[in-house]
Image (tube, coloured by chain):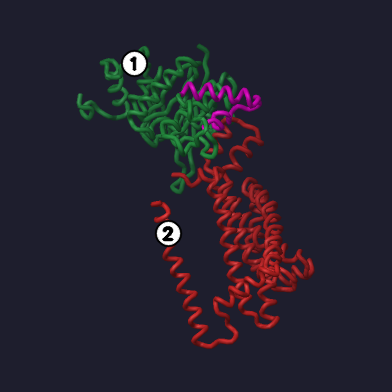
Amino acid sequence: MPTKIEVSDLNKSFATDKGILPVVEAVSLTVQDGEFVAIVGPSGCGKSTLMNMIAGFIQPDSGTVRIDGAPRTRPDAKGILISQQGSVFPWLTVRENLMFGLNGHSTADRWAVAERYADIVGLKGFEESYPHEISGGMLKRTELARALVVKPEILYMDEPFSALDALLSLRMRNELLRILAKERHTTLLITHDVEEAIHLADRIIVLTPRPTRIQAIFAVPFPHPRRLAGREAQELRIAILSELGVDRGELGS
Amino acid sequence: MARIKARIKETLPSVILLAALIAAWWGAVITTHSVIFPTPWAVLTGTLEMLEDGTLWRHIGASLMRVGAGFGLAVCVGVPLGLWMGWVGSAYRTLNPLFQILRPISPIAWIPIAILWFGVGDASPIYLIFISSVFPMVVQTTVGVHTIEKRYLRAAENFAVSRRTLFRQVVIPAVLPQIIVGMRIGLGVAWLVVVAAEMIALRSGLGYMIMDSRNAGNRYDLVISGMIIIGLIGLSLDATMRILEGTKWARWRYAH
C-alpha cells in the first residue's frame, strides 16, 4: 500500500496569558492508503490540534504534512473533516446539505448523487427535512453522507460520535464500517474511547498528555466484524489503557 | 373550539384595559366639560367623516408611499453594505467608526439639512426615513456576518466551494434571520420618522393631517384619530415583519 499521509516532526504551541503553551511536540506518523488509524489520548492533550494541522485548518509552527507526497498547505475536498459538534448547515435541507459539496456538476447529477448517499446512510424520506426537524443520529448520518458525496480520499473524524448516546454511537460505528467496507477511504479518527478505536481501527496511536507526543502504537489485527468482548480485544484494551495511565487495579481485572 | 377559547382568554385582559381607558377618557371629558378635548365618540365620527370624503386614505397612502420608498432604499443599501462590512475586515474598521457617530443623531436633527438639500417635497421625508432606518440594518447585518459560527465557514472551506456558493448557500442564509431583525427595527424607526418629517411643510400624510387639524380650527378629534391610526398601522407593519421571521429562511434560527 502506498503512503497516503506523511506527517513529519510537527510542532505547535499557542500563546496564552500565561505564556507560550506547547501543544504538539515532534509528532511524526504515516498513514497508508485505505488504512484506518485511530488516535487516542487523554482529554485536552492536543489531539484536535494535531488533526486540524493534518487536515490543513491550522498551520504548524514547524514540520510538514504531505498528502500523496505533496505538501499540504490548506484544507480541500480531498479530505473532509467531521467534528464532534457537527457542521451540517441548519438553514439547508438534508438534500441541500448533501448536494452542497458537489461543485461543477449539473443539478440533475447532484440530485441523483445526493439521493444515492441519502439511501446509503439511511436518510431516505428525510431529504426535505431541515436539521432541526431530525434526530441527533440522523444529523450525524447527514454529516457523514455530505462528506461521502464528494468522494473524499481521506476522512478526518474528530470524536464524531461522542455526542451521541452509547447505543446510537455503537450503531453509527457499525454503519461507518459497513460504508468503509464498500468505499475504502483512508480514515483518521480521533477519540478518547479506547473501545471505539479497537472496534474501528487497523492501527491505534496513543498520545501523551500535553505537549503531546506519540507514546505507543498498536496494531489491531482482528478481522471484521470484531468481537469486542473477546479475550484478545480485552487484552488489547487493557494494554492501551495502561499506556494511558489506567492500571489493572482500576479496571477490575 | 378550545383554541378559540384559549385565544379569548389570552386577549381578554388587554381588551378590558383598552375599554377601561376609553371609558376613563370619556368620563374625564364629560366631567371637566372640556370644549377642546374630544370624546371618543367625536373621534370616531370625525374619522368616519374623513373616511367618507377620502382624505384619510390619501394621507395614509402618502405616508406609506414615503415609508416604502425610504425603507426600500435603506434595505437596498444597508443589507449589501452590512454584508460587505461583516465580511471584509478593513471595510468594517474604516466605516464602522463613522457609522457609530452618525447613528445616534436623531432624524429630527437632520430636518434642516434635508430641507436644504431636498426642499420641501417628497424627497426630504424619504431621505429622513432612509438615514434613520439604514443604520440599524447595516449594524444588524454586520453583526449577523460576524456571528456566523466558525464551524460552518470551516465546512465551506473544507468542501472548497466557489465564492458564489459560499455566499449563496452559507453566508447569506446564515445572516438572513439577523437581516430580518434589522428590517423589523428599521421599519419601526421609518414609521416613527415619517410622521415627524411630514409635520414640516408637506400637504399630505398622517403627520401633516395631525398638524393641519390642530392649526385649522382646533380639530382635536382628528388629531387623536391620526394618532390612533398611526399606532394601528405601526402595529400591522410590525406584524408583517414578524411573519417574515416565521418563514423557513429564519425559522431554523429559532428552533431548539
* Segment tinted magenta in the rendering: A94-121
Query: Which residue bears the numbered disc 1?
Result: A226
* Quadrant housing the C terminus of chain B: top left
> Could you tell me which secondary element the residue under label 2 belongs to?
helix
Q: Specify the subunit that label 2 lies on.
A: B
Q: Which mark is residue A17?
A: none
Question: Can residue A58 be seen by looking at this rendering?
Answer: no
Q: Give amino acid for label 2.
A: Ile
Q: Residue B89: percent from the left, percent from the top?
A: 63, 48
- The colour chain A appears in is green
Question: Can residue B60 be seen by looking at this rendering?
Answer: yes
Magenta run includes residue A104: yes
User: In this rendering, do the residues under marks 2 and 1 share a single chain?
Assistant: no
Q: Specify the subunit that label 1 lies on.
A: A
Within-10-Å neighbours for mark 2: few <14, some 14–19, many 20+: few
Q: Residue B94: percent from the left, percent from the top?
A: 67, 54
Q: Which residue is drawn at the image coordinates 58% and 27% (left, top)?
A: A77
Q: Residue A110: percent from the left, percent from the top?
A: 60, 25
Q: Nearer the viewer, residue A151 or A56?
A: A151
Q: Residue A206: percent from the left, percent from the top?
A: 38, 25
Q: Nearer the viewer, residue A165 or A47?
A: A165
Tell me: residue B79, above or below residue B55. above
Query: Which residue bears the numbered disc 2?
Result: B8
Report the mark closest to the observer, 2 or 1.
2
Tell me which chain appears red: B
Q: Which residue is drawn at the image coordinates 40% and 17% (left, top)?
A: A202
Residue B41 lies in quadrant: bottom right
- Main secondary structure along the magenta-highlighted residues: helix
Determine the CA span between mark 2 and mark 1. Answer: 63 Å
Q: Nearer the viewer, residue B52 or A54?
A: B52
Q: Please state if A245 lies on the left or on the right of B43 as rendered.
A: left
Magenta run includes residue B233: no
